[in-house]
């Protein structure tokens, strides 16, 4: 197995998956790729199976039955990665809102001492493009709210583009992660900080998806809003 594993959860990403796989494998650093597909009816998983013939040993697929949540997909991928002894494990979206080229910068941040490197929209140098102003404001002030409630210094608390050293995932007791929607990303950062791990924010350009359909919903956002308070006052 390689040293670096990128985990990408998918549900109906047939329009993006081929380009994403080829882009990751064209980067100047070597990355293996694990697609965790939740029974996409559009054939995403079948296309990955075809691509595996072209990229044997690098491209991996885990198929699950139906939509089980973003957090469970990542937890599944983390456990898969740990049993195969990867040193650096990444999270990213399939829709190109995260630029695959930034994987190299996240990796370098961890190689230079970060335990968790976060691709950040709201740290100095970070930007958001192709989002309506209302969505930008909602996302920005959501991060402000999280920082105020949890007393943490991460500016982009909801970011889902990250690199972990394996020791972080080994330490965080993955079976005890409570939240599986939008709040999952917040909880993972909060737990890492509480365990004493060093988080470094790497500025990125975040671009809203062009192809496919967003998975964001009011229910997911509400879980995060309430979940932050629960995290803050949890006895754990």
Image (cartoon, grey):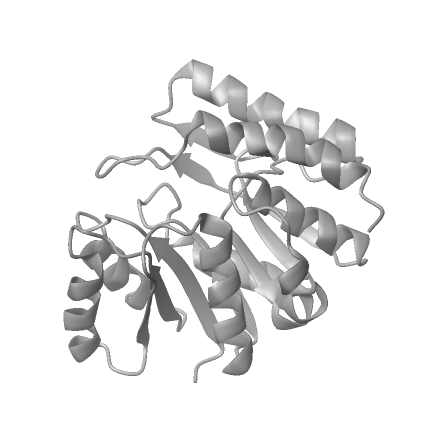
The residue drawn where x is 45% and y is 70% is 5
In the image: residue 114, left or right of residue 118: right
The residue drawn where x is 72% and y is 68% is 171
Q: Position of residue 18 (x, y in %)?
A: 19, 58
Q: Position of residue 186 (x, y in %)?
A: 63, 42
Furthest residue in direction right, as rendered: 235
**Which quadrant, please, contains the N terminus?**
bottom left
Residue 85 visible in the displayed image = no
The residue drawn where x is 70% and y is 63% is 172
Q: Position of residue 140 (x, y in %)?
A: 57, 24
Q: Position of residue 153 (x, y in %)?
A: 75, 38
In the image: residue 217, left or right of residue 225: left
Instruction: Name the foreground residue: 41 vs 164.
Output: 41
Residue 78 visible in the displayed image = yes
Instruction: Name the foreground residue: 228 vs 126.
Output: 228
Quarter of the image where one finds residue 57? bottom left
In the image: residue 102, left or right of residue 163: left
Q: In the displayed structure, would residue 24 be above or below residue 181?
A: below
The residue drawn where x is 85% and y is 47% is 235
Q: State the count of labels.
A: 0
Furthest residue in direction front, as rendered: 65
Q: In the displayed structure, would residue 138 be above or below residue 202?
A: above
Q: In the displayed structure, would residue 233 be above or below residue 24?
A: above
């Amino acid at each position: 197995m390689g040293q670096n594993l990128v985990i990408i959860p998918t549900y109906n990403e047939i329009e993006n998956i081929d380009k994403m796989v080829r882009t990751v494998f064209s980067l100047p650093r070597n990355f293996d790729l694990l697609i965790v597909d939740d029974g996409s009816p559009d054939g995403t998983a079948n296309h990955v199976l075809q691509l595996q013939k072209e990229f044997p040993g690098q491209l991996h697929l885990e198929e699950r039955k139906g939509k089980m949540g973003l957090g469970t997909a990542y937890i599944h991928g983390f456990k898969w990665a740990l049993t195969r002894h990867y040193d650096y494990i990444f999270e990213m979206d399939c829709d190109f809102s995260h630029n695959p080229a930034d994987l190299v910068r996240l990796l370098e941040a961890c190689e230079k001492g970060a335990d968790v490197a976060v691709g950040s929209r709201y740290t100095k140098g970070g930007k958001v493009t192709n989002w309506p102003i209302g969505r930008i404001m909602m996302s920005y002030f959501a991060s402000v709210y999280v920082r105020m409630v949890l007393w943490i210094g991460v500016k982009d608390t909801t970011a889902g583009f990250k690199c972990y050293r394996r020791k972080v995932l080994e330490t965080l007791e993955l079976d005890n992660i409570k939240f599986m929607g939008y709040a999952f990303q917040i909880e993972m950062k909060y737990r890492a900080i509480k365990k004493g791990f060093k988080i470094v924010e790497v500025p990125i350009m975040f671009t809203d998806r062009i192809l496919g359909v967003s998975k964001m919903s009011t229910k997911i956002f509400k879980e995060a809003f309430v979940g932050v308070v629960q995290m803050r006052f949890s006895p754990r």
